[in-house]
Amino acid sequence: MRQDCESSSGYDSGCMLCPRACGADRTVGKRGRCGVDDRIKVARAALHMWEEPCISGEEGSGAVFFSGCPLGCVYCQNREISRGERGETISEERLAEIFLELQQQKANNINLVTAGHFLPQVRDALLLAKRRGLRIPIVYNSSAYEKPEALLQLEGLVDVYLPDFKYMSSALAASYSKAPDYPQVATAAIREMVRQRPEPQFDERGMMVAGVIVRHLLLPGQVREAKKIVQYLYEEYGNQIYISLMNQYTPMATLSDDPLLGRRVTKREYERLLSFAAELGVEQGFYQEGETARESFIPEFDCQGVLRKCEE
């Protein structure tokens, strides 16, 4: 991998940034539970058409896919980068340039995909880019496995929070993500996101410019779990948030022998979830139509847009 230049870490010697609190000294090149050290690593920076309509629009969302992930779900759809093995190491200066380049490409927003383990550097890059003319909304695309006190660093910088809510069951979270604390962590993180952005706002084109969209990826055989999540979100937040119910789970080859994770979500399973949400009274939401569980919906992590043209 080529390195643009050293980036300032923003960490103390033992990393406690995410709920794993692994204590790894990422400042000296050691990898944390996220799979990366403290140098920003990005696997793709390009227009992305496959988010919710109010995020992608016709022009696309300026998605920046960061390498590494503290959660490490066994069924991860972005396994190529979530383990931290793919991507280019860049500086905060270069990251700020990427944001501005995506704006020049007419992106509707800057979409920070799994950026939490680089949060101090991302914050500094956003501040730098805003000083240099970044004007489009900032979307924080997250697993919701975040500390609320870490999210405070983003207050006033992030316009739209786009978290997942994966599990209500601690046992399922332990089995699939080795994170039995996920339900407690995610509910606290989403509460902080809504505190920062309590009112959904849209521009004249219908693009979201402020607010919170909570996603849930329906897993095979887990309709009951999904219903609990939808009910919690609706009863807790009502019309303060949008709920996005997704059926695009794509089974990975490594899980082919698993009786549940080795198959796709059935049409019947998804219809049951949508019917439940409608009966509950959910009106502010998104659902997916047609065949979405295809690997073609997983982008190429080929480092497009990451390096300067002269460095490619």
Image (cartoon, rainbow, N blue to C red):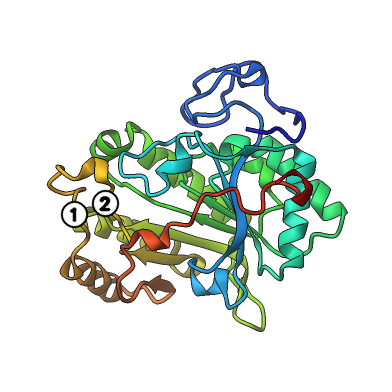
Q: Say if 287 sits above or below 123 in the image.
A: below
**Res 268 quadrant in image:** bottom left
Left or right position of 242 against 65: left
Dot 2 surroundings within 10 Å: few (below 14), some, or many (20 or more)?
Answer: many
Tally the marks.
2
Name the residue tied to disc 1: 263
Query: What's the residue type where badge 1 is placed?
Result: Arg
Query: What's the residue type where badge 2 is placed?
Result: Pro
Instruction: Tell which residue pokes out farthest to the bottom in this image.
Output: 204
Residue 194, image x and y in percent?
A: 55, 56
Residue 280 in sight here: yes
Residue at horizontal 45 percent and vertical 59 percent from the top: 214
Residue 99, image x and y in percent?
A: 73, 55
Residues at discs 1 and 2 in contact (Cβ within 8 Å)? yes
Residue 211, image x and y in percent?
A: 58, 64
Residue at horizontal 87 percent and vertical 55 percent from the top: 132
Dot 1 surroundings within 10 Å: few (below 14), some, or many (20 or more)?
Answer: some
Q: Which mark is residue 251?
A: 2
Q: Say if 160 sits above or below 190 in the image.
A: below
Residue 126 in sight here: no
In 3D space, how far apart are the residues under numbered discs 1 and 2 (Cα atoms)?
6 Å
Left or right position of 170 against 263: right
